[in-house]
Image (cartoon, rainbow, N blue to C red):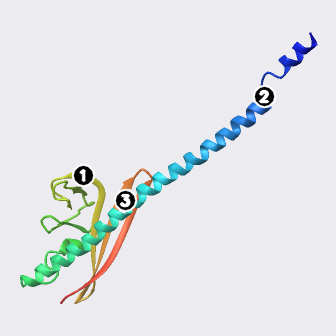
Amino acid sequence: MKNLKIKNRNRGFSLLETTVAVAILVAAVIGPLTLASSSIKASSQAKNNLVAAGLAQEGVELMRNFRANNIFNDFSWTAGMDSCFSAAGCQIDAAILEIDACGASCSNLNFGQNSGLYSYGAGSPTIFIRTINIETVSANEIKINVSISWQEKFGQQKFELEEHLLNW
């Protein structure tokens, strides 16, 4: 009879052993999940920063092109850029090379699947807003500040690019 009692006593785990095992299991699961969450956040932010940098550079190049068209057509080199000198800034459409005043705020850019262009015409709306501000440095120099802002899951983001253009 004594042998039966001893065999029954070693059947299960104690409460302390179970608690320690669960704690180790939870710690082993939480670490990789935290790392995965951080990686997803960083990936999303990096992608949007890359797109924003490209859109800012495109804004500068569009303003250079606008200046060149003015000069080739015998206009003043800053003709048509008046709305960009205001505090609200302006927006320029890559598809039609037209400058519009922003008013209270600039519009979100659209992405055209067929053309591959970000513009204000046809296409799917994006999270990106491009605002262009110009300041006069001298009679023959202007400073262009292109600001790309967007709202994502992790808060409001902004990318800015500054360029100086000369009258040639």
Q: Amino acid at mark 3?
A: Asn
Disc 1 to disc 2: CB gap under 8 Å: no
Q: Nearer the viewer, residue 136 or 95?
A: 95
Q: CA distance from mark 2 to mark 3?
A: 50 Å
Residue 155 falls in image quadrant? bottom left
Badge 1 marks a residue whose secondary structure is strand
- Label 3: how many Cα within 10 Å (few below 14, some 14–19, many 20+): some
Please report the residue visible at 60 percent of the width from the left and 48 percent of the height from the top.
31
Q: Where is residue 29 drawn, in percent x and y?
A: 60, 42
- Disc assigned to residue 100: none
Residue mark closest to the camera, 1 vs 3: 3
Pointer 1: what residue? 125
Pointer 3: what residue? 48
Q: CA distance from mark 1 to mark 3?
A: 15 Å
Residue 143 in the image: above or below residue 103: below
Please report the residue visible at 23 percent of the width from the left and 72 percent of the height from the top.
84
- Disc assigned to residue 15: 2
